[in-house]
Image (cartoon, rainbow, N blue to C red):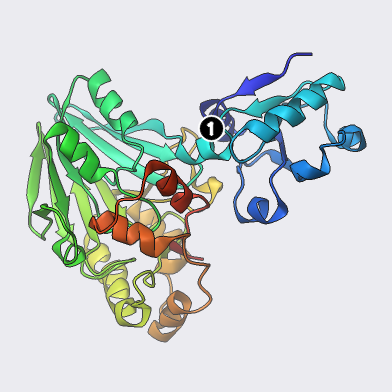
Amino acid sequence: MAVKVMTAHEVTQKVINKESLFILDVRNEGDYNDWKIEGEKFNYLNIPYFDLIDGVEDILDQIPSDMDVLVVCAKEGSSVMIAEMLSEAGRDVAYLQGGMKAWSEHLEPVKVGNLKEGGEIYQFVRIGKGCLSYMVVSDGEAAIIDATRITDIFLDFAQDKNVEIKHIFDTHLHADHISGGRKIAEATGASYWLPPKDAEEVTFEYEPLEDGNIVKIGSTKIDIQALYSPGHTIGSTSFVVDEQYLLTGDILFIDSIGRPDLAGKAEDWVTDLRESLYYRYQELSSDLIVLPAHFMIIEELNNDGSVAKPLGELFAENHGLNIEDENTFRKMVTENLPPQPNAYQEIRETNMGKVTPDEEKQREMEIGPNRCAVR
């Protein structure tokens, strides 16, 4: 029986379509517990590769025959060997092409909606990391918001749409993943925008994102509303696109709110975080569709694979927006936070331009789940 190959795109479709999948993850227990492929109808078995080198006979009765089976490892090699052993034992299995490395780097483009004067807005779902990037397309022009370091997909997508990338924005100085904004700007000649309060230590030229800026992409207005000190950073910035969409960066998520501690300033910034969420956002239209820079849990995905919800619904349902007592709020966002992202200080320095790790080092720095939210 031949061993099948499953791509990260195919696994992503199973996640979005809420299909069943059995995953045999042959990484060590610590890596598996830290970060794994998640799906609402996925089942799991974690047995390290080294425990299976001498044969798979002891686990055959744990491998189902009534659903697709996928063998997963870090970079592919171990999963190919175990999948071949299972196949020789008569089991119909596949391995994940490129392993968790490929899963970490896969981006799935999803159309979020149409713009009033023509054009579209797309969300790029980095399914394995929970990162969300955006492209606004209008009249032959495009803007990208919160691009990841995997830049080819944005360049290829723009080429397929026959649009010229004119502007790239980062809502804040990212701490959990390496931005691709500067790289895309260098490749296309587009303007690269950053909040100046986050850019005091950067080593490169940029356009300052400031409250009141309005940038036009084709026929579409991107209204920049600098919300002081929310989320991770002192410069975190929101965008209202086409009077329909609110891009919140890492201030507000669908199921949670942003953590203010990744620059060691939790106590200093918690008041600003509350002011942005509880007062400035309250002044915005409840009909705006919130498009965050991350999602935390797979249940936040809509049926079409997008991560989006009206602001009014979040004020009704998101626990982080419904804590009346300020001291309770302060305690929630400064205590009992999840572990900080892997290599987050190195990632911040990379995004400042202070260090330039090679491709493999950048990949290692990003491995693991995002941990941007207060949980």
- Which image quarter holds the N terminus? top right
Q: Where is residue 236 in the image (x, y as percent from the top left)?
A: 25, 62
Query: In the rendered view, does 113 fall on the left or right side of 254?
Result: left
Q: Classify 98 as above or below 27.
A: above
Query: In the rendered view, does 122 fall on the left or right side of 75?
Result: left
Query: In the rendered view, does 287 fall on the left or right side of 165?
Result: right
Identified at 47% across, 77% down, the residue is 332
Note whether residue 178 is visible.
yes
Instruction: Determine which residue is flagged by label 1.
Output: 12
Q: Where is residue 78 in the image (x, y as percent from the top left)?
A: 69, 35
Q: Classify 158 as above or below 168.
A: above
Note whether residue 19 is visible.
no
Determine which quarter of the picture holds residue 322: bottom left
Query: In the rendered view, does 223 fall on the left or right side of 67?
Result: left
Please name whichever residue, 348 or 337, is drawn nearer the observer in this view of the structure: 348
Q: Give the residue type that dot 1 points to.
A: Thr
Q: Position of residue 313 (x, y in %)?
A: 40, 54
Identified at 18% across, 60% down, the residue is 202
Q: Classify 233 as above or below 59.
A: below
Q: Position of residue 6 (x, y in %)?
A: 61, 24
Please name whichever residue, 125 or 263, is drawn nearer the observer in this view of the structure: 263
Question: Could you say whether the residue bearing mark 1 is in a helix, strand or loop?
Answer: helix
Please name whichever residue, 14 or 51, is drawn nearer the observer in this view of the structure: 51
